[in-house]
Amino acid sequence: MADLVTEPNLPDPDGFYERLIASHQGLDDAASRRMNARLVLLLANHIGDPEVLGQALAIARDGFAETATRTP
Amino acid sequence: MVAAAARPRFAYVPPPEIDDDTVRRVPVVIVGAGPVGLTAAAEFAILGREAVLLDDGDTVSVGSRAICWAKRTLEIFDRIGVADRIADKGVVWNRGRLFHGDREVYAFDLLPEPGHRRPAFVNLQQYHIEDILLERVAELGLTDIRWRNRVTGVEPLPDGAARLTVETPDGVYRLDADCVLAADGVRSTVRRAMELDFKGRVFEDRFLIADVIMKAGFPSERWFWFDPPFHSGRSVLLHRQADDVFRIDFQLPSTADPDEERKPENVLPRLRQMLGPDVDFALEWVSVYSFTCRRMERFRHGRVFFVGDSAHVVSPFGARGGNGGIQDVDALCWKLDLVLSGSAPERLLESYDDERIPAAEENIVNSTRSTDFMTPKSAVSEDFRAAALELAARFPFARRMVNSGRLSLPHVYRATPLSTPDADAWDGGPEPGAAAVDAPVRDRDGAAWLLGRTGRRFTLLWFADEAGRGPLPALPEALRPRVELVTIARRGSPDASTVVDSDGTAFRRWSAADGTAYLLRPDQHVAARWRRPSIGDVALAMERAIGRTTPEAGPPIAGG
């Protein structure tokens, strides 16, 4: 069973971060949210392994209060 | 403010050329007696060369300004004989701590392995660095320092040299120089006189710097806060300097009025909120600045060379301004020395741009990324930053994304024409173009450092299992006096040209085996390396490293 990789795995984290921010340039907030959603779906499909995706979902969700999800 | 007023003024002496109609010609003029110009003066003096150093002021730096001196810079300072004084006076630190809101996210150690002469950083105010360098330059005795001598004009001469117009309190004189180093800072008068470009990006955000004297119990570490309770929504950096002086940087909104922000009545409440009600402190110096990342298109213009902030300027997070400038000088002075003495062709000087423009680009890229991380420009970039900081508390991968400054490392000169590409297989060690790495060794006097045996001239580091024998006995005869041979032996006794690597650290860091050799330039960067070179290999690499790529073409072309 595979585990989610949480050790550094990107060859150039700063370069990736710069590209990530730059790729949102010129988008309004709503478009940026949609773009992020597409990105999550693309990467999830690439990963495929439900075990890994489950771990990622749990970590990403951790720490948010319940009410935060009900914001319209 | 307080400190600046207390600094001594250096005496202006009327230059001899003022009343002389003939124009004197000198080999080297350095413009600007900041850390970069003074390091150049010391480097030339170490190489046995005189220089005239012109400065438009008559004091050392006002305010602490550049404070973080990186390991590679300290190694260069070792070469010119000031690193011990700087380390003794300064604050050694290797550890950084990062806070988000009211909690610590993580801490990091910048130099996790022992066995290096110098630490990751020494913090020391720029005015102390300048005092120490001035003292050293005076000891070396080859520099003619002229205070209140302001360069206002630069004209090329037909033979490639430059004629400077210099203004003094007694009037104007002219001085011809075979080469000029413009170390006169971000507002370089030399650059303006030559009407050269200085392009890049100006960030809207402003930062308030305060030098604060206090006896607080902060350790010798770099502390960085994102969104702290005492400065909501922005970032703050704390550094310790010598004499109980602390540097505190507050990020300000882009709408902040610099003149208002630097008034003590506005600075003091910010500091009080940060330090709490019980800490006694006094304000030494305050400044407000905005970030810029700019550089000249080329740093060499004939025989005028731009070094330090005159050539390139970066935002301060990451300590790339002062350190980048010192490394410009490191890469330039030995080349000028060889060309001025006719030992290398003029084209050796072209490699200054080949080496230092990519280095400046690397510094600008890193500095821009840090600045962008610190000052998110949109809601989505704020979200990503918050996510990275939240995840960083638990997960190592996210710590690599949090960016409060990527600290200065020496640039690897991958694009330089002076390096000989690897022909052998390597699984580590400094590659061609990289700076030498230190290791503890034993010499005839006992414990020593490998880097102390290198620099100022070409060095062939030759690794051997046993002291006193090896595969290249003829090499020193063949290449002396241009190359100094230093043998690093696993076993045996040290002698005049042999050091012993008792614990194998040098062999490991240099990925060496019996017969491995590295050719190091006078600036301690690797020119070539081999598993088992012939004398011919070394001779060819030497020719290449001084800009003569076709040695069979004949004698060197004299510079000038």
Image (cartoon, coloured by chain):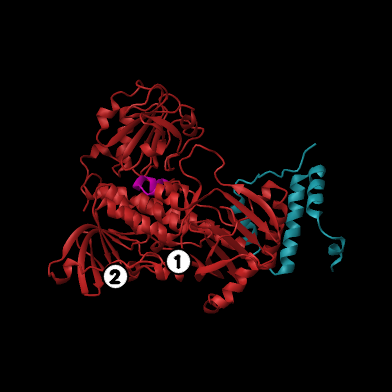
The secondary element bearing badge 1 is classed as: loop
- The answer to whether residue B256 shows anywhere in this view is no
Name the residue beneath numbered marker 2: B150
Q: Quadrant of residue B222?
A: bottom right
Q: Quadrant of residue A24?
A: bottom right
The secondary element bearing badge 2 is classed as: strand
Up-down relation of residue B179 to residue B532 (above or below): below
Up-down relation of residue A11 to residue B531 (above or below): below
Is residue B328 or residue B456 the one in the foreground?
B456
| Three-letter code for the amino acid on which mark 1 is drawn | Gly
Residue B309 falls left or right of residue B11: right
Query: Within 10 Å of the Cα at label 2, are there few (<14), some (14-19), or many (20+) other Cα atoms?
Result: many
The chain assigned the colour cyan in the figure is A
Name the tint of chain B in the rendering. red
Q: Quadrant of residue B274?
A: bottom right
Is residue B196 or residue A61 the one in the foreground?
A61
Name the residue beneath numbered marker 1: B63
